Amino acid sequence: MKRTLIASLILATTLSTFAGATELPQAGTFIGGAQVSFGSIGHDSFSSDEDGTGQVMWYLDYYFMPGWAVEVGLNSGTNVQDWICNNDDIDTDDDYCVSSDESTTSSPESDLDFYNIIVAFRHDKQISENSFIYGKLGAQYFDYEMTEGSTVFEDDSGTGIFSELGWRYEWSNNLTANVGYQFLGMSDLSTSSLTVGLGYRF
């Protein structure tokens, strides 16, 4: 993840040489875009939060006043690192999932799939002619399913917290790039991820 962050910052800095000045998003404008995220999974019954996850998110921001927006988004994710779960007695407080490289059992590897519908407030603060820091805070409806082979051993849905903090760069042609840190809380499950994205202001 550190290499991705460094590469993104180097790219944005290099391209900024060719950019003109931009202003804080004004009322009535939109920013739409997509971003990918990679990070870790936390779960109340995992032995660790080392298990990786990958996500793709599409979003649209509507600015109702300068620098302030409402965001709606659709996020989809899955595990990118396998784990093995022993769900013989999942009602106990004992950990029942471990990373596959920590287990010597021959149990089938387990999978996770989830999606989120997000509604959040967003605030941008300009720190230079083309650079902004931003924060997002809101709620999301989640639905996730954990499977072992063809057996579903845990699924849940409901509402949880969504938050993101990051840095955005905007070129004079209204194309934007962002790097941020995102958190999703989904009942017993949570993800903490580095996110990188592209968008367009219109």
Image: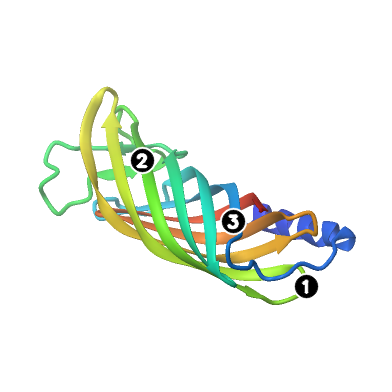
Nearest the viewer among 59 and 166 is 59
Nearest the viewer among 124 and 37 is 124
Q: Kindly check if marks 2 and 3 are in contact, taking CB atoms under 8 A apart as contact.
A: no
Q: Is residue 161 left or right of residue 57?
A: left
Which residue is denoted by mark 2 in the rendering? Answer: 114
Nearest the viewer among 138 and 100 is 138
Regarding mark 2 in the picture, which secondary structure is present there?
A: strand
User: What numbered label is drawn on residue 30?
Assistant: 3
Q: Count residues near mark 1 (Cα–Cα under 10 Å), then give few for <14, some for 14-19, many for 20+.
A: some
Inspect the image, locate mark 2, and give the three-letter code of the amino acid beneath it.
Phe
Which residue is denoted by mark 1 in the rendering? Answer: 129
Task: Judge depth for marks 1 and 3 and give the one in front.
Answer: 3
* Residue in the image at 89% along x and 62% along y: 17
Inspect the image, locate mark 1, and give the three-letter code of the amino acid beneath it.
Glu
Where residue 196 sits: x, y (%)? 61, 52
Where residue 8 sits: x, y (%)? 71, 55
* Residue in the image at 29% along x and 50% along y: 46
User: What numbered label is drawn on residue 148?
Assistant: none
Comes first in the chain, label 2 or label 1:
2
- Tell me the distance, in whole angstroms, between the alpha carbons under discs 1 and 3: 19 Å
- Within the image, what quadrant is residue 114 found in? top left
Task: Judge depth for marks 2 and 1 and give the one in front.
Answer: 1
- Within the image, what quadrant is residue 134 found in? bottom right
Q: Is residue 92 left or right of residue 57?
A: left
Q: Count residues near mark 3 (Cα–Cα under 10 Å), then give few for <14, some for 14-19, many for 20+.
A: some
- Tell me the distance, in whole angstroms, between the alpha carbons under discs 2 and 1: 38 Å
